[in-house]
Image (cartoon, coloured by chain):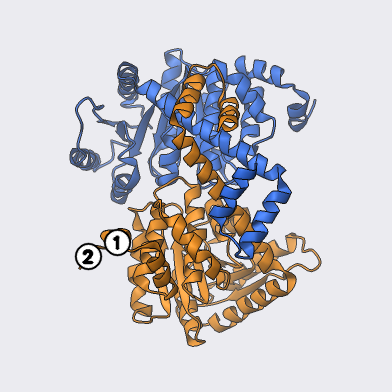
Chain colours: A blue, B orange
Amino acid sequence: LTAPTRAVHDTGCAEQVERVRRSEPGAIARTLTAIERRSPDVNEVLAALHPFTGRAYVLGVTGPAGSGKSTLVTRLAAAYRRSERNVAILAVDPSSTLTGGAILGDRIRMGELAGDDGVYIRSMATRGAMGGLSRAVLDGISVLDAAGFDVVILETVGVGQAEVDIINVAQTVAVVSVPGLGDDVQAIKAGLLEVADVHVVNKADLPGASKTVAEIRDMLRLKQRQHGQWDVAIKTTSASTGHGIIDLIAEFDRHRAWLEVHGGRTELDRRNTATRIRWAAEEHLLRQLGRSSTLFADAVDDVVARRTDPASAARNLLRQL
Amino acid sequence: LTAPTRAVHDTGCAEQVERVRRSEPGAIARTLTAIERRSPDVNEVLAALHPFTGRAYVLGVTGPAGSGKSTLVTRLAAAYRRSERNVAILAVDPSSTLTGGAILGDRIRMGELAGDDGVYIRSMATRGAMGGLSRAVLDGISVLDAAGFDVVILETVGVGQAEVDIINVAQTVAVVSVPGLGDDVQAIKAGLLEVADVHVVNKADLPGASKTVAEIRDMLRLKQRQHGQWDVAIKTTSASTGHGIIDLIAEFDRHRAWLEVHGGRTELDRRNTATRIRWAAEEHLLRQLGRSSTLFADAVDDVVARRTDPASAARNLLRQL
């Protein structure tokens, strides 16, 4: 009866936190929207949720457009559900804005997994600066983690630095290729080779699948593997028929176990935490600069008049704060 | 005789600054590469160049792939050259990485404008975080400005938030469309409508050009124009034949003059300066955090152990610094 936008303000922080922890879809959605918009009160909610994070398995799935990622992710989610694991899907398109097509994917997939309380699907985008999306993703994963999802699948669209930055926060990164997009193996070479824990050749029933597998194998051979490093495997799937999904999940489980044994999980948690602290420090600094608006305006004046340069002005400002 | 990578270290800052000011292509290239890589000594060079900036006219050209932007930019550069204005072209692809295809464009275009000392062409990309590219672009423009180029054409590939962020630093923003890519007018709607000072319908000899013009006109009508605001025009060009280029440059000159009269130039300079100071402050902060590594590691420990949350840890760190 109340409009959803009102509800954000009506719900106190403590109650919102409780509702997220009870995995209420409405509360999760409101919190993720607040993260996308970087609402001022979202930090309070995130701080209160933090003690309840650190349990979810975060699986990253990325690859070029047309590789059938979304169908694959839907299949993975359904398979995880059959083994009683709750699944959240966070789909991220670094090139889209809030007004873009991000919402569309939700609707299309909802049909297949709809009515299952153990599945939550959400697209994410931000209107803010470019780095804002990586931050929103890390915060979004924390919310889904605190909401008790066993598996959070982070899906990114496209191949590029943006995807590498975002997918890197996942515990396991699966890079999806398809036969017949020869150039895309080149694209993977450019950025995604370094981050892949598992290579998936999807649409493996298409002609050329074995050629794609061979190309990726060649790429992996060129990469020098150090002693004690994870052995990156190439798995074939056909998301449309479901072929290879169980085997792929077994590989993810194997990687997850490997991470635990080799301390990779803790290392990743520390890296993501360091990133979040840095972002929080930057936000705090920018808020301080915003508050001392006269000092800041004077600094801008000095630089515009070429009395000083941006870096010196910044150092001077920080000294005065 | 010395490898270019060695030369960066061999050349002292003062000498590099002098060479950039004399518009030596090698010195400009080295400085832009140092900016892309965020070399530690680049801040010193930028600080020394800052007093000599603020004169160049920065023209942003953006639009969807396939709109013929690169040919248009080459034509614009040639036309500016005919009126004795030195031109630098900075081509930016937000989705590419350093190892990507960014370098390619230079080679292709060099043929047409080669051998002219009054033209400098360069692609830019960064390996770093996403926001890093916007920063590299602003710094790169400063270098070209200090090197004495009258016009700096900033060309971005694609349509999205990344392009909006980057192109916004230009004094005049031209958004290029083409007939027959109906969806791309939608794409422009999503993000680029707000930033366009001039709309260019390129390939105007193709069927459907008048329809594209009409669609953009409709979009502009929906946008409420405030009193005293710039009147966004729609210009048609055919970059392949050169039709409309002179008229387009006249429109850019008109916008440039309008900016001067209405204080828009100073406003933009202040906005870009504020951004640069913020980035410099952030960099300084991150360097401080890096130096106090024990404090920072302790903060990470506390957050990983869920004794505190990232935002509280960051506030605490800043207090201690």
Q: Earlier in the sequence, mark 2 or mark 1?
A: 2
Q: Position of residue A228 (x, y in %)?
A: 22, 24
Dot label at residue A131: none
Instruction: State the quadrant of the N terminus of chain B.
Output: bottom left
Q: Amino acid at mark 2?
A: Thr
Taking depth in this image into account, of B138 and A295 the one nearest to the observer is A295
The relative height of residue B107 versus residue A31 in the rendered view (above or below) is: below
The relative height of residue A233 versus residue B33 in the rendered view (above or below) is: above
| Left or right: where A231 falls relative to A15 | left
The residue at the point 72 percent across, 69 percent down is B263
Which chain is indicated by disc 1? B
Q: Gap in Å between the C-alphas at discs 2 and 1?
A: 10 Å
Q: Amino acid at mark 1?
A: Asp
The relative height of residue B67 versus residue B41 in the rendered view (above or below) is: below
| Left or right: where A30 falls relative to B141 | right
Q: Are marks 2 and 1 on the same chain?
A: yes
Q: Position of residue A199 (x, y in %)?
A: 30, 34
Taking depth in this image into account, of B269 and B66 the one nearest to the observer is B269
**Can you tell which quarter of the image residue B21 is in?**
bottom left
Q: Position of residue B261 (x, y in %)?
A: 73, 74
**Can you tell which quarter of the image residue B220 is in?**
bottom right
Point out the frontmost of discs 2 and 1: 1
* Residues tagged 2 and 1 counted as in contact (Cβ below 8 A): yes
Which chain is indicated by disc 2? B
The residue at the point 64 percent across, 44 percent down is A320
Instruction: State the quadrant of the C terminus of chain B.
Output: top right
The residue at the point 40 percent across, 51 percent down is B40
* Local secondary structure at mark 1: helix
The reply to whether residue B208 is in sight is no
| Mark 1, residue position | B10
| Mark 2, residue position | B2
* Local secondary structure at mark 2: loop
